[in-house]
Amino acid sequence: MLEADRRQWWRGALQLTAVLAIALIAASYVGLLDYRKLADGLPAIATLMGETMPPNFTEWRNWIKPLVDTLAMSIAGTALAVAFSLPLAILAARNTSPHPLVYQAARIVLNALRSVPELIMGILFVAAVGFGALPGVLALGLHSIGMVGKFFAEAIEHADEGPIEAARAAGGSRLQVILHGVLPQVLPQMADTAIYRWEYNFRASTVMGMVGAGGIGFELMGSLRIMLYQEVSAILLVILAMVTLVDALSSRLRHKFK
């Protein structure tokens, strides 16, 4: 037993060493360990930070509607994702998928949706439907389907088989088994996932505005383009305050679902 523990310890140490080595190689490759280059950039960073102070809030009234747009964009995008993720997750879970081919197809769809960054989707939807919040909602929603659907499917796959077998033994159809044997077990996890995704989508929706999808990010990009750095810092502080409020609200919601 002692020898087995020793081998396990050495195996873990070797794995940790390999991970650290890969991380150091990657950091060196991208220049993160180039201390001279980093040190040379510090004066420019200090100068830029000085130009952002003090924050200029004189235009705060013009930011209220973009903030509301950003909040609405994140809520609508998350709702769209949850609505489409649930049926896709049922098809992408081994214990609820009707056929292996359906399972593989659903997994491919989820992989494809989350492989394209929401920023790229935002650019494409802006080109397709024009400026405004709609392309941001579509981009956030479609990308979120890939992530939320994956987590939903994994939650379904980890559901306890006892209630599922009981529903089948009672003569329930496939839909009844899912409704009465699977979903009651995983709904709290799904609610957690949806709330976390809403937090992420609120932050991501500010980036959507930078590509023309409306919201407070559009105002931020406008100030950056004309180099109003004091206004930029004010908008960033407003975004920080909103993110803090959203995080606090989501924490309360998660607590209620436990």
Image (tube, helix red, strand yellow):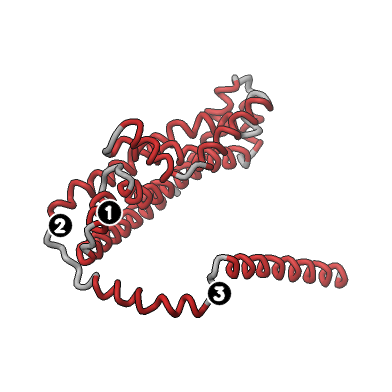
Residue type, mark 2 in image: Trp
Helix, strand or loop for disc 3: loop
Judged left or right of residue 18, residue 51 is left
Helix, strand or loop for disc 2: helix
Residue 253 or 51: which is nearer the viewer?
51
Residue at the spot of label 3: 33
User: Could you say which quadrant of the image residue 111 lies in?
Assistant: top right
Residue at the spot of label 1: 221
Residue at the spot of label 2: 60
Residue 97 or 36: which is nearer the viewer?
36
Residue 89 placement (x, y as % from top left): 55, 34
Residue 19 placement (x, y as % from top left): 67, 65
Image mark count: 3
Residue 22, label in figure: none
Residue type, mark 3 in image: Leu
- Name which of mark 2 and mark 3 comes first in the sequence: 3
Is residue 229 among the parts visible in the rendering? yes
Helix, strand or loop for disc 1: helix
Residue 41 placement (x, y as % from top left): 41, 75
Query: Gap between marks 2 and 3, in whole Å?
Result: 40 Å
Name the residue rendered at 50%, 45% in the picture. 189
